[in-house]
């Protein structure tokens, strides 16, 4: 059972409170006995603090790197308020945050197209779920995204008979190029950098947080696209953090390049910082639901 931060027994808590009261009384006593200028100074501090609070922060503090904002700068723009939505259960998909772009909410595939040819997405919608129609081909979002938070839920079929890479294989391709593996890895060994939640061919997940086939699983993918210099060479590799069913399985992994099979990935050619989110058809009827994405921008 997880330990609750700050939890204490009632007895210890009472002792703590009594100790604090005693300390407070001692402090008050010392103040009463102090010279009048101490009281005046205290009043000045209180007034000063009050004025600072009215202005929200400080302007006499050091500048943060970049030289635009002070430490605790009250004039710094307030972060926009959003409705964070709600979490999914096995029975019901959650609600996307209010500033998310919803790519699939159980109704239709309007936000998607076939990667090959650009026609209508050939997969099915059943019971509010997107289902791969095997061997109809990969699909991708019509909209392109760069740095983002992607939430996607999947369920691999029960009774699948393939083994290793042949069991309920699909994939999420960031920018249409970088594969995060989707697979039934509940009881299905394969090469570790090819199992569920791996950056395919590069990084195994830190732990295997897979659920059984038939259950809903979640990926929360925090993606930062690679940057390329004027010389066409990569100046900042892509990084990716992934939570699989709420557990961190990739922690700012430095991506080596677009996905490769049986070859070492590398940034052999520059590409735009945005691209589609693509889903792989590997011939298995994996199901998806509750897909949304939030673009991530710089501070302020
Ligand atoms: Mg795959």
Image (spheres, rainbow, N blue to C red):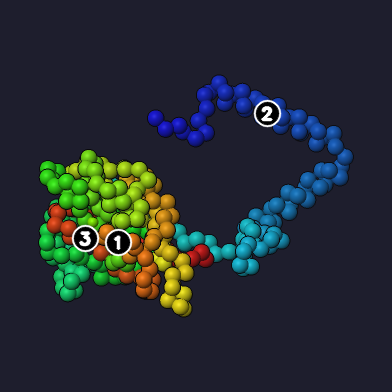
Residue picked out by circle 3: 280
Q: Residue furthest top?
A: 11
Q: Residue at x 26, y 67 (%)?
A: 141
Q: Which mark is residue 263?
A: 1
Q: CA distance from mark 3 to mark 1?
A: 19 Å
Nearer to us: label 3 or label 1 = 1
Q: Is 248 placed above or below 20 here?
A: below
Query: Any atom of ligand 1 within 8 Å of the CB at mark 1?
Result: no
Query: Any atom of ligand 1 within 8 Å of the CB at mark 3?
Result: yes
Q: Earlier in the sequence, mark 3 or mark 1?
A: 1
Q: Residue at x 17, y 46 (%)?
A: 163
Q: Is 143 placed above or below 280 here?
A: below
Quadrant hosting residue 76: bottom right
Element at label 1: loop
* Percent coordinates x, y for residue 139 in the rendering: 20, 65
Q: Earlier in the sequence, mark 3 or mark 2?
A: 2
Q: Residue at x 47, y 62 (%)?
A: 80
Q: Which mark is residue 21?
A: 2
Please rate how many residues cluster around mark 1, counting C-alpha atoms within 10 Å: few if below 14, some from 14 to 19, many from 20.
few
For the N terminus, the quadrant is top left
- Image marks 2 and 1: residues in contact by CB distance under 8 Å: no
Element at label 2: helix
Q: Nearer the viewer, residue 277 or 88?
A: 277
């Amino acid at each position: 059972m997880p330990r609750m931060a700050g939890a204490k027994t009632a007895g210890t808590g009472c002792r703590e409170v009594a100790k604090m009261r005693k300390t407070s009384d001692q402090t008050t006593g010392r103040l009463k006995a102090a010279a009048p200028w101490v009281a005046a100074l205290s009043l000045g501090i209180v007034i000063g603090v009050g004025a600072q609070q009215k202005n929200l922060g400080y302007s006499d503090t050091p500048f943060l790197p970049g030289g635009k904002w002070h430490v605790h700068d009250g004039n710094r723009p307030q972060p926009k308020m959003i409705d964070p939505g709600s979490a999914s259960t096995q029975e019901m998909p959650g609600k996307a945050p209010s500033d998310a772009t919803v790519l699939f909410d159980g109704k239709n595939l309007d936000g998607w197209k076939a990667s090959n040819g650009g026609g209508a997405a050939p997969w099915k919608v059943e019971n509010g779920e997107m289902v791969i129609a095997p061997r109809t081909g990969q699909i991708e979002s019509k909209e392109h995204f760069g740095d983002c938070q992607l939430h996607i839920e999947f369920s691999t079929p029960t009774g699948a008979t393939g083994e290793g890479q042949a069991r309920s294989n699909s994939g999420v391709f960031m920018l249409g190029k970088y594969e995060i593996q989707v697979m039934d890895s509940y009881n299905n060994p394969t090469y570790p950098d090819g199992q569920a939640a791996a950056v395919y061919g590069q990084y195994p997940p830190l732990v295997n947080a897979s659920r059984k086939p038939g259950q809903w699983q979640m990926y929360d993918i925090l993606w930062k696209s690679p940057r390329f210099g004027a010389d066409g060479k990569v100046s900042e590799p892509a990084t990716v953090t992934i939570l699989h069913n709420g557990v961190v399985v990739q922690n700012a992994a430095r991506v080596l390049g677009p996905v490769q099979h049986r070859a070492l990935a590398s940034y052999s050619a520059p590409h735009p910082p945005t691209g589609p989110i693509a889903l792989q058809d590997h011939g298995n009827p994996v199901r998806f639901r509750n897909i949304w994405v939030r673009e991530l921008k710089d501070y302020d």
